[in-house]
Every structure is written in structure tokens, then in C-alpha cells.
Amino acid sequence: MSIWNPHFECMVKDELKQLELERLQATLNRVYRSVAFYRKLFDQVGLVPDEINSLEELARIPFTGKTTLRQSYPYEMFAVPLRDVVRLQCTSGTTGEPIVVGYTRNDLVHWTEVGARVLCAGGVTKDDVVQICFDYSLFGGGLGFHYGAELIGASVIPGSNLDPARQVVIARDYRTTTLIATPGFGLRVAAVIREKGLSPADIYLRRGLFTGEPFSEVTRKQIEDELNIKATDNYGLSEIAWPGVAAECEKKKGLHIFEDQFIPEIIDPQTEEVLPLGKKGELVLTTIAKEAFPLIRYRTGDITVLDVSPCECGRTLVRMRKVSGRTDEMVTINGVSFFPSQIGHIFSEILGVEPRSCLVIDRRGDQEIVKILVQVSEEIFFDEMKKFQNLKSRVEREIYRDLGISAEVKLVEPDSFARETEGKRVIDKRERS
Ligand SMILES: [Zn+2]
């Protein structure tokens, strides 16, 4: 098992903290000089970048949110003149306005470096044939993986957005050993292999690196079993680096955050207070090595937990748990906050699958109640239905135990499910009453 850059990935904690502080000070000075938004923000709270002498003082700076980035379209948040920018990409813009992200030559060196770390953590070596099934356009993460894989010296196939059937033919003929894709795409590849009457033994895949979508342990196991590979998770976001913020090593016990590049914090999304280590909350990132598009205390909207316990792989970098939800999906019932995805996880653990479900929140007297509508498929066999019914009370018990809320699970046929939910994951009737 190898580590791409032991110097940065296995640093003694004190040295790492010192490096982070120096890079933070340099970044704060740069954004104060070059980005009007940050100059104004720092002035408002009376912050002089040179006076920041510890990492804890980072908490004095207000957050940067996605709305600010959208309002700065296209170049207001850039910390260098356009002539120093060598690449422009943007976030996908599936929700709202896109955000333009620029990279200097140095930024691309760093991005390539973290890309190589991600791949190396997942087990890729120069002997591998790596097939990248991510879009290579303006929006995609394909380029980040591509340069990282080339730096390692692997043979890289830019599969880009070809359909799963063509990717499978290429994987078989070119003897691909490593698949890089979303978990959903991994499952579609497995389905194509089955449909073609092939077995995983007919192709040469040994591992897959997945990202871009929620990736539960149930899905991981399904992908590993169906493709007969080892599957690891990694994390990034286009505003900062995607891929390249954090990567799971082959021990599969959380994703190592590349702290020499990004400082992570966990905050309570509602009170915005920094939470102690080990508490679940929203991940906030500060970039400390980026030149063109540095971000200070950027709210990712992703919910996770940080873990500083030692990892058997030897990396000393803090780990983040798999992202368990998004702040914009958070629901609060009777004062208890949770994410619909947490209920999904409970279903997966008990049933082995995550059915389509929708939360209906309402009031009964002075109590807030939640009903969980679960879609049962048309083809579902009678005994499966019975199994579901038998497990219903167990699911309700687990939801109460894990989340502290009383919920009523109701099985619904597809037609009525579509009619009652209108495709929503959460229906809040409290607002109307
Ligand atoms: Zn590790």
C-alpha cells in the first residue's frame, strides 16, 4: 500500500499545524489585498490578516456562502488578474447560477498533486489502466482525475460521458483495472456486464474510485460484489477541488482530508458555532494553497464528522466520515433535527435496500408528527411484502433509537406514491396549518 506524498500526508501533527498557519496567513493577506469582498468583510469585523497568529482565530472570520459566489459572477472573487489564469471551469449549475472557477499554473500543479494522492489512496499504481467515466467538459471532474492519473504514470482512458455499454466494451478490450465513476454509474456498468452475459471474471477490473453522489455502505457492498472489485469513496466540490479535497484509503475508514491544502471545520448549521471534534455538523473549508480562487470558511452544505484517531495506513491527516446529508435538506420535528438520508440509511441497514420514500410532516394537537411513505414495487412478491410488514415496527424502533423521533412507516403502491408525494422527498404540512 503506497502513499503518494508521505511528506505532506504523514506529517507530524505540530509541523502540519505550523504549515497550515503559515499558509493561512499568506492566503488571508492575499485575499485582503486582491478580493474586494474579503477586504470589506475583514474590515467589518476589524480583522488585520497579519494579526492572525493561531488557527483558532480563523473562527473570527464570517463564512463565505454559495450565494456570495453566485453574486460575484463571473470574476469578482478572483484573487489574480485574468492574465495569470490558465484554466476556467465552472460548477454544474444544476441548482441556480453557475460559479466560474479559475486556476493559475500553480493551482493546476496542486490540483494534479491532490488528484494523484486520491488515486494512490485508492490503490492505483503506474501499472494500472484507469478509465475515467466523468465528463471532461467545463463542468466535469474528469480533468482532475486525468492529470492525477497521468502524474502517477498509469495508462489513462478518458472515457468521459460515453454510455455504460460502450464503457464496458472499452474496459474489456483495453483491460481496464480501475474504474472512476459515480456509484450510480458503477451499478449501471455492473448491469451491462450481466446483460451482455459476461461475468466480472471476463474483465480485468480490480478497483473502483467513486464520488459525486451519496455513497452508502450498502451501495458500496453491492458494487464490490457485483463487479468483484474494491470500492473506495472520495470527496471534493467544484468550487474548491473536485476531485481532491479528501480520499478514502484502502482501510475504508473515512476520507483523509488533505489538510496542507484545505483547513476543515465542523459547525452547527443553525447556530453557526464551531463544534468540537467528533460532533456531526456542516463541513466548512478554507483553501490555503489556491491562488486564483481562494475561499475562506466556505460553507459546503455537506454534513459529516471529523475523526483524528490514527489510521492504519500511516497517513496522519484527519478523516471525514462519508457525507451523510445536506444542510438544505435538514428537517426539524419537535426540536429534533435530522436528514431524510439518515432514514434512508436505516432502511438500507435493515432491509438491505433503500426504497423510495417521502416524509410527510404534520401537526396533531401540539405534537409534530412524521409519516414515512415507502414505495413498494409493483412486482414485489407477497412474501416480500410480508417481510416488509414484519420489519415495519423494527424500522420505527430504530428511527426512534437513532434519531429520537417517533415516525409511522406506511407502505404505498407506486401509483398512489406518485400521487401523494408529487416526486418530493419531504412534504411539510405544518406551514399550512
Ligand atoms: Zn488511512
Image (cartoon, rainbow, N blue to C red):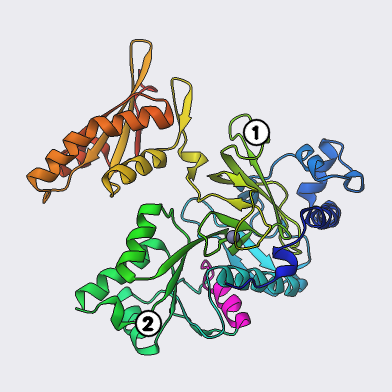
Q: Are marks 2 and 1 in contact (CB under 8 Å)?
A: no
Disc 1 designates what residue?
A: 272
Q: Name the element at disc 1.
A: loop
Compared with 367, 105 (above or below) is: below
- Residue 239 visible? The answer is no
Crowd band around label 2 with a 10 angstrom C-alpha radius: few (<14), some (14–19), many (20+): some
Relative to 58, 146 lies left or right: left
**Quadrant showing the N terminus:** bottom right
Numbered disc in front, either 2 or 1: 2
**Mark 2: C-beta under 8 Å from nearest atom of ligand 1:** no
Q: Residue placed at 55% from the left, 84% from the top? A: 154
Q: Residue placed at 36% from the left, 67% from the top? A: 186
Extreme residue in the front direction: 312
Quarter of the rendered image showing ligand 1 = bottom right
Q: Quadrant of residue 421?
A: top left
Extreme residue in the bottom direction: 173
Question: Residue 34 versus residue 119: which sits nearer the camera?
Answer: 119
**Mark 1: C-beta under 8 Å from nearest atom of ligand 1:** no
Q: Quadrant of residue 161?
A: bottom left
Crowd band around label 1 with a 10 angstrom C-alpha radius: few (<14), some (14–19), many (20+): few
Amino acid type of disc 1? Answer: Glu
Q: Which labelled disc corresponds to residue 204?
A: 2
Compared with 69, 230 (above or below) is: below
